[in-house]
Image (tube, helix red, strand yellow):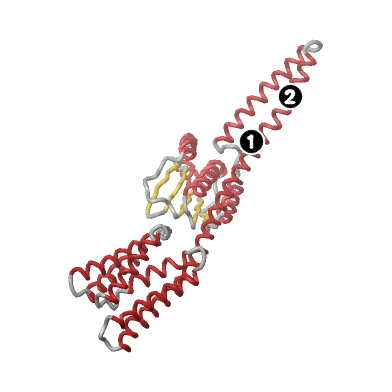
Amino acid sequence: MFGPVLAVVGAVTVAFDARNWWEAAVLAAGVVATLVAFVRWAADDLLRVAPATVATTAAVWAFGALVGDGRMAFFGISFVGALVVPRLSRWRGWAAVVLAGYVAAVGAARLLVSHQEAPEVLIRYVLIPTGVTVVLVGLMFPNKRFYDIVAELEEAREREAELAVIRERVRFAGDLHDIQGHTLHVVKLKAALAQKLVGSDVERAEQELREIHDLVSETITQTKELAYAQRRLNLSAELENARNLFEAAGIDVRVDREADVDQRVGELLGQVLRETTTNILRHAQATQVRITLSASSISIVNDGAQRAPVTELRGLAALAQRVAAEGGELSVDQHDGEFRTAAAFPNRRAEADR
């Protein structure tokens, strides 16, 4: 928003100071350099163009003070210098002094080439340009610190989100270990027992092998259910877990319970909540999440959605098939920077109303 204002100020400066077309061209070069510096500053890439923009605006100020009649030609060097100096890794104080000294020295040099009264020259070409430069630099130092703090907070937020996702993965790994670790240990013991019984008690050995087969089959089923987030999920526990994950990532979360959730759909709604929570932490830049629960539906809305077409989320796509198989519908949509994930079971709602 500040860019157009800067361009207007630059245009007014050129119109006010230029006496002919070539003076206008020189002054316009300073305005362009100033705009380039501001754009790169906003993109956090200022130092790459700093030498060229500082040199250009410094030369324009020297031209305006010593060749033309550009009392406002300091506009570029003051603004660009104020952007560059706080971004330096060291010697920022000395750089600020050199910048102010250069502006003042060039302005004072006009006394050598102008027939104007000395007080007038000192006020218009020394005091005002130097004062404006010092004020701008002074304002940018705390502004730089503010942006550094914002960047640090954003970095911390991203780390919290990554840790939240890692914690979710650790929880998944723990569930997988609970399922398979116990089973494999039991299978090992039963296989060893069956091996000992083969020669002495064939019937007992066959029974142990059947139990091993049933146990492995059950474990395969449980592992598949876990992979699709379908293993005995408790909606209340998932809701509390989602709240903790979002708060750990610095995301404000609000939960609205419009009614008690039907137990028959609570597990599926918990699966939707778990998958959506992971997607928000991984893919969105959310600051707020709103979760709404009714007797047979859930809606999760987050801000910070990327302004791009909704991409396919494979976890939700697989879950949508499971929800559809139970007579429900899972939908995702994006509007005005908000991403909404919703699951509803209209048949269950109709049964509850009867």
Say which residue label 1 marks. 176
Whole-percent x and y of residue 89? 51, 63
Which element is circle 2 on? Answer: helix
Whole-percent x and y of residue 23? 22, 71
Whole-percent x and y of residue 126? 36, 81
The amino acid type of the residue labelled 2 equals Lys
Say which residue label 2 marks. 188
- Residue 139 - label: none
Image quadrant in which the N terminus is located: bottom left
Is 71 displayed left or right of 198 in the figure? Answer: left
Name the quadrant containing residue 263: top right
The amino acid type of the residue labelled 1 equals Leu
Count of numbered circles in the view: 2
In the image, what residue occupies the spot 52% across and 65% down? 90
The reply to whether dot 2 and dot 1 touch (C-beta < 8 Å) is no
Dot 1 alpha-carbon crowd within 10 angstroms: few under 14, some 14 to 19, many 20 or more:
some
Q: Between marks 2 and 1, how big is the CA–CA gap?
A: 18 Å
- Tell which of 118 and 300 is nearer to you: 118
Query: Eyeballing the image, is 280 above or below 48?
Result: above
Q: Looking at the image, tell me whether mark 2 or mark 1 is earlier in sequence order.
A: 1
